[in-house]
Amino acid sequence: EVYLAPERFVAETFGGSAPRPKLLWLTRDVAATAAKILGHAPPHQRQRYWTDGNKSAWVLDEIGKEEPITAGFVIENGHITQAWVLVFRESRGAEIHYPAFLKQYLGATLSVEKQLDRNIDGISGATLSVRAMGRMARLALYFDAMKQMEDK
């Protein structure tokens, strides 16, 4: 089910007009860390993102149980300010798209160990979807940090 089209998520994030997308190239080190976060190699050698100053938007896909979940994250100054489930394709676990679940990610940062700085409460029957969402949140924060380093 499409809850929010990725293009609309990006446009709304930036006040109705999306900036031009940029690319983060996954160097060997970045790809290796991304693989540790995901538990598998990232599917692409580059990741598209949108940015305007200190705000960046990331649209990521990760397998829940069997199908990809598409999520959008907005990062500002190293903190998640928005988390959305954009497209959910699984037969179970759709509860992760509810605001009551997603608000747990707001303000989250990434620790030195590449973990979220907080525990995220699970949802009975949606364990794999919750885990996929957590991996994507960590990856968005990590990619944003790598983007910041590239910009310097």
Image (spheres, rainbow, N blue to C red):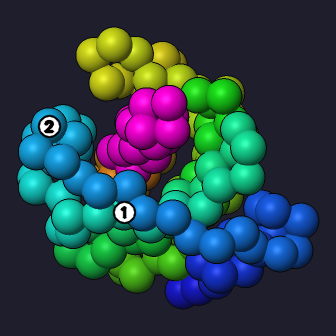
Which residue type carries mark 2? Asp
Camera sees residue 83: no
Is 14 left, or right, of 141 in this rendering?
A: right
Residue 133 image point, x, y percent: 42, 51
Residue at 36% in and 63% down: 47
- Count neighbours of disc 1 (C-alpha within 10 A) and say few if under 14, some if 14 to 19, many if 20 or more: some
Task: Say which residue appears at 59% left-offset and 28% top-offset.
Answer: 78
Instruction: Give the residue at the far front of this rendering.
Output: 152
Q: In the rendering, at what x and y percent does residue 2 appear?
A: 59, 85
Q: Is residue 95 above or below residue 32?
A: below
The 10 Å Cα crowd at callout 2, few under 14, some 14 to 19, many 20 or more, is few
**CA distance for labels 2 and 1:** 15 Å
In the displayed structure, does residue 15 sit left or right of residue 135?
right
Which of the pair 98/33 is nearer the observer?
33
Is 18 one of the magenta-colored residues? no
Residue identifier under label 2: 29
Q: Is residue 141 covered in magenta?
A: yes
Q: Is residue 53 left or right of residue 41?
A: right
Q: Tag 1 or tag 2, which sits nearer the N-term?
A: 2
Name the element at disc 2: helix
Q: Which residue is mark 1?
A: 47
Which stretch did the figure color magenta?
Answer: 135-152
Residue drawn at 83 percent across, 75 percent down? 17
The N terminus: image quadrant: bottom right
Element type at marker 1? strand
Left or right of 130 on screen, residue 99:
right
Amino acid type at circle 1 is Gln
- Near-viewer residue (134 or 149): 149
Q: Residue furthest top?
A: 112
Look at the picture and state if 94 lies above or below 74.
below
Residue at x 31%, y 24% (from the top left corner): 114
